[in-house]
């Protein structure tokens, strides 16, 4: 040891020393500047209770406030526009949560709860516990002794069901894995068992191996290796996810409860249960609240739950709090870059504090602290950003945690003391027996009080924990406080230990540093290769002679008169004379869409001004240009262009999951330049996204015929690859509108071309008989074959004037009258042509349209 009295505390805890041993501090900028900008309220405060709750940044709250001040969010159980906006935004947040944990809606569902404890209680109440009987063994509820009270509390619900409860010591999981015992007839049993463990101990910060998830599920680890049945794993991630990335594609726990205030600081009272979809099917539920029923009777015991996980969300969810989560994710990414950066930053602070505190000695050489951990903070995979300890005086006696807490408060240092709702870990590290707990209770000590020492032995400890906004100054302030208040001077350092800890290789980030590659989502379908659809059904393209015969047979006079593509969903059309066909329809048709700040698709129903954005595609220059269309002038807003293909774009642009017509789609952001352009024009924050090139979105199963071997891929269209309308049908509707306006003395005129634009079809054909297209089953346009798969239902969007963005009642009102209450107009098509050559098929205006009549197409 070496006397350190001649060194100042500044030298002892200098940033220079810290930065030499740790290269991952901060997020590429000035950490203090981030704190001054986002956390002005903590000036003069040393906040070290991030495992209790982290702190929210000001920009998170500001963005959320602007969101709810700008948008009207209604109850998601209604169907009005404000309610639909809420529903779509909440669904977008669900996707964002799954994306954060590197999984997809194909694998997991998000059930919103009031917190992590409520998520755990949901599992306790709905898990299909089975009592032991003559038919076979019962379920087992097994849990690591180092678990939060709310996890251990599941045993109350399990015990009522006659389930065996088995506490497991941390070392037993692997130590007993090789011991094989008789399963007493359980081999092949489907009896459900549940094993619960924390990804990170909220007491000591110890990280338990995530490989335990598969190890228990495959019954290779204890206690699953000793018992048959089916084993499920609940991974308590509440403490872990605040500072560490969790990849559920690698560690697919059946249940993952979280609390969002531990991640973002806001909102409180909101959590979620992430549950594997295949596991959700086995859960049972007795109580049912509003929004969870598909149907029920009040005078008969008849109840049918909703088919998805919404059956677990009783009543109206906290939708405004949920919407705030989007801003939490956005702000966290903006400030830190990634959870890996957060993990490295916070671990470095915890490691340095541990190093100094573990080496700090009183003047007589005795340690200043008893630290409760299982490692020396050298491995980021094994240890989180938590330091738990007791202060010792120069005689080796424990200084009560309550005394330390009160003194820390005088210095405006915020820490946590007690047992932290983790009795098992507290007993283990402080060597408190079961009898001690009972004796302490008789002596008047209960959880959460200030009775910190009983008969000279501690009843709890001190915990400091770090968050992404924590700074090296927080470490300095805390260590300075301990030295000034509790260390007998002159203090010393265990120089040998200090040198060893400071110079050893500090971290193994092999697993944690692996970047997340978003898992493709396919809506339950498969069969794509390099972004191309495979397996088209083979339909022979008719010869010119066959076409001529068919034309004479049917007396066909149909021709393709107009060809429109809509590169950006809900924006203006781009009319062409000819255009290539791609695997998802017309090339680049609805490949892009505009989304709001929460990632929800904007349509003309919500934002009519979208029709004034004119997309222009130039295949020669490989660009998509956006400009303000027609006679509408917008001062100073010059056109903006982006590459057609994402390979030309910045590879660092974020991918995400969005929703189109009920389908999950994988998308890519098109960058800040075009986002700024759109935001300026629309007057609200928004972005342009495009469908990821290797993502396959399959057409809805109900539109495919039994035995079909083809796969029909969709872009960001609502229902099908193509929409066709007949000019004869438009003409009949236009006459009905004229007659109505004449009888009502209205002078608003909707000509044929205006109506054609309102219906936003890809293919416009000429014909003599209105609505005859609804009787077709197939048709040939030029050399390409198409199948009619249904009629297009219409909504209020056809009331938007495509030249002025004004809303009108027509033609929706007249369409309903003209069609006797039906609001369908046009038919959906899919490409059914054989692709026997490398030549790219092309549709051209003027091509003959040869229909095949085979009954009526059904509505989609």
Image: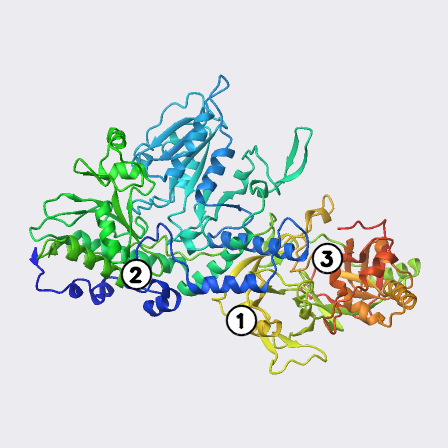
Q: Earlier in the sequence, mark 2 or mark 3?
A: 2
Which residue in the structure is indicated by mark 3? 834
Q: Is residue 795 visible?
A: yes
**SS class, disc 3:** loop
**SS class, disc 2:** loop
Which residue in the structure is indicated by mark 1? 648
Name the mark nearer the viewer: 2 or 3.
Answer: 2
Residue 100, x across and y down, in percent: 47, 54
Q: Is residue 179 above or below residue 525?
A: above
**Residue, far bottom:** 636
Name the mark nearer the viewer: 1 or 2.
Answer: 2
Quadrant of the rendering where the N terminus is positioned:
bottom left
Residue 652, x across and y down, in percent: 47, 66
The alpha-carbon separation of the residues under discs 2 and 3 comes to 70 Å
Crowding near the residue tagged with mark 3, few <14, some 14–19, many ≥20 C-alpha atoms within 10 Å: some
Residue 485, x across and y down, in percent: 16, 55
In-image side of 634 versus 37 (left or right)? right
Marks 3 and 1 in Cβ contact (< 8 Å): no
In-image side of 506 versus 658 (left or right)? left
Q: Is residue 500 visible?
A: no
Q: Residue, x 39% and y 56% (percent of image)?
A: 514
Q: Nearer the viewer, residue 288 or 306?
A: 288
Q: Residue, x 60% and y 70% (percent of image)?
A: 644
Q: Is residue 781 above or below residue 377?
A: below
* Quarter location, residue 829: bottom right
User: Of the numbered discs in the image, which one, if any, rests on residue 729?
Assistant: none
User: Of the numbered discs in the image, which one, if any, rests on residue 45?
Assistant: 2
Q: Residue, x 72% and y 65% (percent of image)?
A: 841
Q: Nearer the viewer, residue 329 or 224?
A: 329
Name the mark nearer the viewer: 3 or 1.
Answer: 1
**SS class, disc 1:** helix
């Amino acid at each position: 040891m070496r006397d350190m009295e001649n060194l100042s505390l500044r030298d002892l805890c200098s940033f220079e020393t810290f930065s030499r041993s740790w290269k991952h501090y901060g997020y590429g900028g000035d950490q203090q500047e981030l704190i001054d900008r986002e956390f002005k309220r903590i000036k003069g405060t040393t906040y070290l209770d991030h495992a209790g709750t982290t702190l929210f940044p000001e920009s998170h709250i500001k963005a959320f406030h602007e969101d709810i001040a700008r948008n009207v969010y209604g109850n998601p159980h209604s169907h009005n526009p404000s309610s639909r906006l809420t529903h779509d935004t909440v669904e977008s947040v669900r996707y964002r949560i799954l994306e954060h944990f590197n999984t997809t809606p194909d694998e997991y569902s998000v059930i919103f709860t009031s917190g992590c404890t409520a998520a755990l209680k949901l599992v306790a109440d709905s898990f299909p516990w089975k009592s032991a009987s003559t038919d076979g063994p019962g379920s087992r509820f097994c849990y690591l002794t180092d678990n939060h009270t709310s996890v251990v509390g599941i045993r109350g619900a399990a015990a009522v069901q006659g389930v065996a409860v088995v506490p497991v010591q941390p070392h037993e999981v692997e130590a007993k894995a090789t011991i094989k015992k008789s399963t007493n007839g359980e081999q092949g049993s489907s009896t459900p068992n549940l094993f619960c463990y924390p990804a990170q101990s909220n007491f000591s910060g110890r990280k338990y191996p995530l490989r335990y998830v598969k190890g228990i599920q495959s019954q290779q680890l204890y206690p699953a290796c000793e018992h048959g049945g089916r084993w499920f794993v609940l991974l308590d991630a509440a403490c872990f996810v605040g500072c560490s990335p969790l990849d559920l594609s690698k560690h697919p726990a059946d249940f993952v409860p979280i609390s969002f205030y531990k991640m973002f600081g806001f909102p409180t009272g909101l959590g979620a249960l992430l549950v594997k979809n295949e596991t959700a099917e086995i859960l049972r539920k007795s109580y049912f609240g509003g929004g969870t029923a598909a149907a029920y009777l009040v005078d008969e015991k008849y109840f049918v739950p909703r088919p998805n996980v919404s059956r677990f969300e009783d009543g109206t969810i906290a939708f405004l709090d949920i919407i705030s989560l989007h801003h939490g994710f956005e702000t966290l990414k903006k400030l830190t870059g990634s959870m890996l950066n957060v993990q490295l930053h916070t671990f470095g602070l915890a490691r340095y504090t541990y190093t100094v505190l573990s080496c700090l000695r009183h003047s007589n050489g005795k340690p200043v602290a008893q630290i409760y951990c299982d490692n020396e903070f050298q491995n980021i995979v094994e240890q989180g950003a938590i330091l738990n300890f007791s202060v010792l005086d120069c005689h080796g006696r424990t200084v009560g945690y309550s005394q330390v807490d009160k003194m820390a408060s005088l210095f405006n240092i915020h820490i946590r003391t007690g047992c932290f709702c983790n009795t098992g870990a507290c007993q283990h590290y402080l060597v408190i027996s079961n009898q001690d707990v009972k004796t302490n209770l008789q002596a008047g000590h209960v959880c959460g009080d200030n009775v910190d020492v009983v008969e000279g032995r501690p009843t709890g400890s001190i915990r400091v924990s770090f968050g992404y906004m924590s700074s090296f100054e927080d470490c300095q302030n805390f260590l300075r406080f301990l030295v000034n208040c509790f260390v007998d001077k002159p203090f010393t350092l265990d120089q040998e230990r200090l040198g060893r800890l400071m110079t050893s290789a500090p971290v193994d980030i092999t697993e944690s540093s692996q970047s997340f590659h978003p898992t493709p989502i396919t809506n339950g379908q498969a069969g794509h290769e390099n972004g191309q659809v495979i397996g088209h059904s083979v339909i022979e393209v008719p010869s010119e002679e066959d076409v001529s015969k068919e034309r004479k047979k049917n007396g066909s006079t149909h021709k393709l008169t107009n060809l429109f593509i809509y590169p950006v969903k809900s924006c203006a059309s781009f009319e062409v004379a000819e255009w290539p066909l791609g695997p998802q329809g017309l090339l680049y048709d609805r490949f892009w869409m505009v989304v709001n700040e929460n990632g929800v698709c904007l349509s003309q129903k919500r934002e009519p001004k979208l029709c004034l954005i004119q997309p222009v595609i130039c295949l020669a220059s490989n660009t998509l240009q956006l400009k303000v269309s027609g006679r509408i002038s917008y001062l100073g807003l010059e056109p903006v262009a982006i590459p057609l293909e994402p390979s030309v774009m910045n590879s660092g642009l974020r991918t995400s999951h969005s929703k189109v017509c009920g389908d999950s789609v994988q998308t890519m952001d098109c960058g800040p330049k075009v986002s700024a352009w759109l935001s300026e024009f629309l007057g609200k924050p928004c972005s342009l996204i495009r469908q990821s090139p290797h993502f396959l979105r399959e057409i809805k199963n109900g539109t495919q015929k039994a035995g079909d071997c083809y796969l029909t891929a969709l872009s960001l269209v609502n229902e099908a690859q193509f929409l066709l309308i007949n000019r004869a049908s438009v003409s009949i509707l236009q006459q009905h509108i004229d007659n109505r306006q004449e009888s009502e003395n209205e002078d608003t005129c909707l000509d044929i071309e205006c109506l054609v634009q309102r219906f936003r079809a890809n293919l416009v054909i000429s014909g003599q008989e209105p609505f005859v297209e609804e009787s077709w089953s197939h048709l040939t346009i030029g050399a390409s074959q198409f199948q009619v798969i249904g009629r297009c239902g219409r909504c209020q969007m056809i009331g938007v004037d495509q030249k002025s963005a004004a809303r009108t009642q027509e033609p929706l009102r007249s369409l309903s009258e003209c069609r006797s209450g039906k609001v369908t107009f046009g038919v959906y098509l899919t490409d059914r042509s054989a692709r026997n050559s490398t030549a790219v098929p092309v549709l051209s205006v003027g091509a003959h349209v040869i229909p095949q009549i085979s009954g009526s197409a059904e509505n989609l």
